[in-house]
Each structure stands twice: as structure tokens, then as C-alpha cells.
Image (cartoon, rainbow, N blue to C red):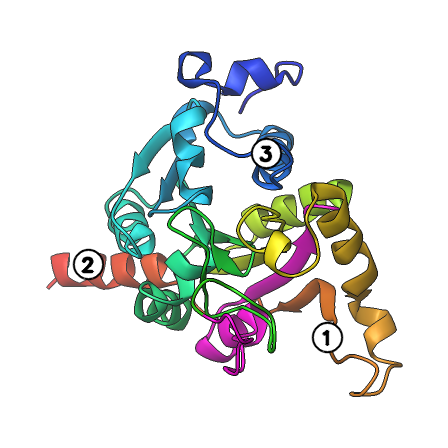
Amino acid sequence: MIKTKFNYDYYLRKNTLPHIWCPGCGDGIILKALLRAIHKCGYSKDEVVITSGIGCASRLPGYVDFNTIHTTHGRALTFAIGMKMYKPKLKVITISGDGDALAIGGNHFIHAARRNIDITLIVFNNYTYGMTGGQYSPTQPLDSFATTTPFGSIEPPFDVCNLAQAAGATWVGRSTSYHAVQLEKFIVDALNHTGFSVLDVITNCHISYGRRNKMKSPVDMIKYQKEKAVPARSAENMSPEELIGRFKTGVLFEAKDKPEFCGEYHKKLELLKTK
């Protein structure tokens, strides 16, 4: 357990900086909240593994001084599962964008949730493929614009949290890059949960998404997050019509009675050894 005073520099690979993120990108806010949360939980660097796939968010492991691996598109969870199965005591965290997690990686997402394996997935949800040209992603809101939906999207978007809960995740939450203090708290909660935890973070890509949707600056997109976010308790008193175009924030689901996959798997191994 780490007991040193918190310092961002301690957790960063400074030789990899400056980062590639655009000025004003929300990814840096999430990175800082993640580092504060890891420190608050007391994990040492050697206890933490961070995996990622491809995309803007997925560059995060390169900047932090933990055990890290930058993998192929959509496969961050498969690598994370392998490491968790081999060394269950590690704290495994997966960083994924909305396209990486729910498009090409969608199959791995639902099966990791179904198994309830003890991994924390943080989805950097900016509604777009920001790194590769601003194409639409599975979370892009209806009628909004991207390079591949120039007349407005007609596809109903995935709700990351509803999908995670339906597939079997046992901790599900949502925050935004605007709510930086709340975000840190939710990451701590997710890390402390035993089982598959999914934190959907609505964040801003003002370059690829915002400028096509009348939000050309980081400030415009941060204001969007503030105005569209509805705490889960407040949402209970709102009609479906009032919630159109808005999203719930908070810890949206938690279950502690479902067996965790690694624990069950290793119980089976021990049982086989006795036969």
C-alpha cells in the first residue's frame, strides 16, 4: 500500500510528454482524476495494470508509470481478462473510447460484463472517432452530425450504462469531465468494487464532434455536459419527455451478490487438484 503524499509527477512517465491530446480535450481531466483515485485507494504502481485499445483515450497508458499495455482496436478487455486470470491479485483497469469499447469491442464488452470479471472499464465517451476522422460512434446522439452522418444520425445510440447493466456488470456509473471531483469519487468506488465495473464518462471532443454540432470550443462542450447531466435521484422525479436529450449521472447500479469470475475459476482449479 502506497503512503506517500500525492504528486502527479510520481505517476507520470514524463519522458513521454507532451501528450497528443488537443488543447481543451477532456481526456486530461479524466487522467488526473484516475491518478488521484488510484492514490486514494492506496495501490502501489506494481499492483496496477492499465490496458487500452486504439483511439485518443487509449493513448493514456503510455503516459502513466504503471504496468501498461496499448493493444489492438477493440481488444483492450481481452488482454485485461488474460492478465486478471493469470494474476488475480492485480488491479486491472481498462481505458477505452466509445468506438473502441462498443463498436469493434462490443462483443468483448458484453462478455466481460456477463462473466463479472473483476476489471474496471472506464469509457471515454465523446460520441465520435476523434483520432481517425470524426466518424460517428455507437453512442452518437440522434440527429447530431459527424463526417459519416452529414445529414444527422438516424441510428438510436447505445446507452453505455443500460447496456453494461443488462449484460451483467455489477457496478455501473456515469460522470462527466465537467464533474471532476465527482468523477474521482466514482473511480474510487469502481476500483473498490469486486466484479466488473463500468464507468461511462461523457467527455468533450470539440475538434471532431463539437465543431460539427455548434460547440466549437472546449467551454461550449463543458457547458453542454453541465446542462445535460441529471443526477439519478433528480431523474426519478422527471418525466420521459423531460429526460429527452439528457443523461443520468451517479452510481446507477451496484450488486454484491453475484460471484466474481476469477474467484470461481480458481476455486474450480483447486477442486480439480484435490481429485
Q: Nearer the viewer, residue 248 or 103?
A: 103
User: Does residue 136 sit above or below 15 in this rendering?
Assistant: below
Marks 3 and 1: which is nearer the front? Answer: 1
Image coordinates for residue 77, horizontal then vertical, percent? 33, 54
Which mark, residue 189?
A: none
**Image quarter in which the C terminus is found:** bottom left
Q: Nearer the viewer, residue 110 or 159?
A: 159
First in sequence, mark 3 or 2: give its number.
Answer: 3
Q: Is residue 159 magenta?
A: yes
- Is residue 116 something that shows in the picture? no
> Residues at badges 3 and 2 in contact (C-beta under 8 Å)?
no
Query: Quick check: is 254 in the magenta stretch?
Result: no
Residue at (36% x, 42% y) in the render: 51
Q: Is 252 situated above or below 98?
A: below
Mark 2 neighbour class, 10 Å CA radius: few under 14, some 14 to 19, many 20 or more: few
Question: Which is in the foreground here, disc 2 or disc 1?
Answer: 1
Q: Would you say 157 lies left or right of 86 here?
A: right
Q: Are marks 3 and 1 in contact (CB under 8 Å)?
A: no
**Which residue is under mark 3?**
28
> Callout 1: few (<14), some (14-19), or many (20+) C-alpha neighbours within 10 Å?
few
The disc, 2 or 1, on the residue closer to the chain's N-terminal end is: 1
Image quadrant in which you'd find residue 108: bottom left
Q: Which residues are magenta?
A: 149-178
Which residue lies under the disc numbered 2?
269
Compared to residue 273, the image places residue 257 above or below, namely below
